[in-house]
Image (cartoon, rainbow, N blue to C red):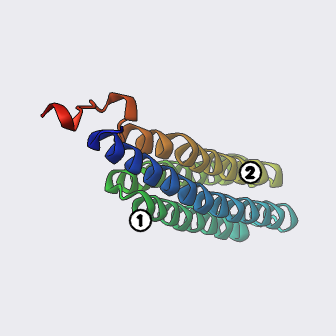
Amino acid sequence: MTCRACRLCIVNLCSVREKKKQFISSVSNVVVVVVVVVVVVVVVVVVVVVVVVVVVVVVVVVVVVVVVVVVVATAAAVVVGLIVVHIVVVVVVVVVVVVVVVVVVVVVVVDLIVVGLRVEVVVVVVVVVVVVVVVVVVVVVVVVVPLQIYSVYPKCEKVPCIDSSMS
């Protein structure tokens, strides 16, 4: 007969599995949105290469990434109930996005001052920014969040089973 501690652990494990499925489903929807946004941004940059457009695209990418990160982090916090996940995801991605935006602005300004703005430089910078931002979001969603989820819940084997008839 299964003891009370084991039954409780099994129920918790089933609940965690269900939450993980819901979370993976919500994350996959967000990843599709991110891919579509990145494709649209890259197409726009390649078609219209002007300084004003580059600045607008960088701002749009930053806004989209921050919105996607907040959505993913909120989905993780709601589905799994982990505020820590929410805080870690938002902080990591916002810091990386800010650093990338600063680097882009510096590169564009230096290019304007030293060489005169060349189309190739602008396209390369914007594509690099998009790739870096997408990689950061994917790493956070695929690595950090699941590790956080797995580390919170104990494995069933570790729960001591005490037979109720012995007490």
Q: Element at badge 2?
A: helix
* Residue 44 against residue 10 in the figure, above or below: below
Q: Which residue is mark 2?
A: 127
Amino acid type of disc 2? Answer: Val
Q: Element at badge 1?
A: helix
Q: Which residue is mark 1?
A: 78
| Label 1 Cα crowd, 10 Å radius (few <14 / some 14-19 / many 20+) | some
Residue 155 in sight here: no
Where's the N terminus, which quadrant?
top left
Tell me which numbered mark, 2 or 1, is placed earlier along the sequence. Answer: 1
* Residue 51 against residue 95 in the figure, above or below: below
Of 44 and 74, the residue lying toward us: 74
Location of residue 47 (image quadrant):
bottom right
Q: In the displayed structure, does residue 158 sit left or right of residue 80?
A: left
Q: Residue at x 55, y 54 (%)?
A: 101
Whether the residues at callouts 2 and 1 have beta carbons within 8 Å, the answer is no
In the displayed image of the protein, which residue is found farthest to the left? 167
In the displayed image of the protein, which residue is found farthest to the right? 47
Q: Residue at x 49, y 48 (%)?
A: 96
Give x and y (percent) for residue 133.
61, 51
Q: In the displayed structure, does residue 81 sit left or right of residue 14?
A: left
Give x and y (percent) for residue 167.
12, 34
Mark nearest the camera among 2 and 1 is 1
Give x and y (percent) for residue 69.
51, 60
Amino acid type of disc 1? Answer: Val
